[in-house]
Amino acid sequence: MLDVSLGTRSYTIQFGSGNLSRIGSICKKLNLSGSSAVITNATIGALYGKSIIDSLAAVDISAECLIIPDGEQFKNSSTLNSIYDVLIERGLDRKSFLIALGGGVVGDITGFAAATYLRGIEFIQVPTSLLAQVDSSVGGKTGINHLKGKNLIGAFHQPRSVLVDISTLDTLPEREYLSGLAEVIKYGVVCDRDFFHFISERVDRLLDREQNTLLEVVSRSCAIKAGVVANDEREDGYRAVLNYGHTFAHAVERLTEYKRFLHGEAVAIGMVQACKLSEYKGYADSSDTKRLIDLLQQFGLPVDLPSFTVEAYLQAIRKDKKVNAGGINFVFNSGIGGSVIEAVADWDFLLSTIRAEVGK
Ligand SMILES: NC(=O)c1ccc[n+]([C@@H]2O[C@H](COP(=O)([O-])OP(=O)(O)OC[C@H]3O[C@@H](n4cnc5c(N)ncnc54)[C@H](O)[C@@H]3O)[C@@H](O)[C@H]2O)c1
Ligand SMILES: [Zn+2]
């Protein structure tokens, strides 16, 4: 169990294996007694929906699954409207609450529905992808995509509780699983040297999705993220550390039109670039970059920049919503386990690793 300390909106994250049936008692303890809608997709709903509904029924909470289509392209306003339609049809009121059962797509859109329906109702996160368990379900960012860009519409809305069941990762497709590990490695690189070692020493166990190792890795990742968020809920300062590797990751995703790489794969590529720039700055040395690349490759994650011109990278980076007039607040790693956040206005410097790799 982990506490996320955010004053009156603090909540707990519970970790376990095979613990979905605890959802009913968690809701009871939180005095959530109204009716509920469990928002999920067809795949995840078929696997885990019944455990959730049965557990709620056992404490007299009436709930039904609300199935949304599977995929990032459906994290949009028309899916959101279809959710509102069902909530209104089913008569959910201000005492009702939502449960997000799924990956980051389900979590983000459910959180945003909860933030806005009747000016805000409660919701609980039951993340089922590794990325959702270690990243998107913690921190209270909710939202949907707009045609003009990802996550442009959203709100901060903290869940009342998060229930993590490690055993749901058994059914997660391999590529999704490995991609989630990139964000886990990120926490080690910029926040916790021991954690980086811990992961490096347990590669085989992680590849086998060994439950005890996963339990430790997921709970430590959440503790790191929760610690950062508790310090800086609305990303005014230190929370930016979580964007490590993401400047280049977003550029790579944009240039490959979100088709070639999963998000975590792009983050793996972006972290290598960020580490090389940290080396140029003297914050890290070449052995740090080598260790990072080795670890990512052991998990089959990509580390090389796809071949686009330097000019194309420049334009893609400039489109990032985190870029402001003066330049970028760039996150460097300080060795392994620390970070330096610095405003960088020198585009030649930012593009130097790209120039060295793609050469044009
Ligand atoms: N709110 C935040 O702070 C935050 C942080 C990072 C990412 N995100 C968002 O998260 C989203 C990505 O999340 P994601 O990587 O979980 O993608 P996702 O939700 O699309 O899930 C990936 C795939 O795995 C499937 N899946 C999930 N759990 C499964 C399970 N246990 N068994 C079988 N299949 C399963 C899903 O159906 C989907 O096909 C993006 O929209 C991103 O913007 C939000
Ligand atoms: Zn990310």
Image (cartoon, helix red, strand yellow):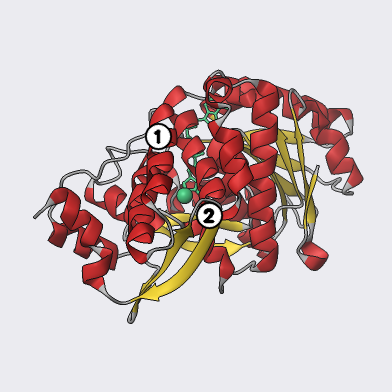
Q: Which amino acid is tagged 1?
A: Asp
Extreme residue toward the left, this view: 360
Secondary structure of the residue carrying tag 1 is helix
Question: Residue 228: image x %, image y %?
Answer: 64, 60
Q: Quick check: 31 above or below 121? A: above
Residue sitting at the far bottom: 326
Give the residue at x 38% y 28%: 300
Q: Are marks 2 and 1 in contact (CB under 8 Å)?
A: no
Name the residue rendered at 38%, 53% in the picture.
Answer: 275
Q: Residue at x 16, y 57 (%)?
A: 355
Residue 79 is situated, as x and y percent measured from the top left of the image, at 47, 46
Front in this rendered view, residue 145 or 237: 237
| Mark 2 or 1, nearer chain start | 2
Q: What x and y, as percent, mark residue 124? A: 72, 46
Q: Of discs 2 and 1, which sits in the foreground?
A: 1
Q: Amino acid at mark 2?
A: Val
Disc 2 residue: CB within 8 Å of ligand 2: no
Left or right: 323 in relation to 161: left
- Check disc 1 and report the residue beneath it: 294
Under circle 2, the secondary element is helix
Above or below, 130 against 233 in this view is above
What residue would you read off at disc 2?
190
Q: Disc 2 to disc 1, how far (Cα)?
A: 17 Å
**352, 285: nearer the viewer:** 285
Quick check: 308 left or right of 319?
left
10 Å crowding of disc 1: few (<14), some (14-19), many (20+): some
Residue 326 vs 234, above or below: the answer is: below
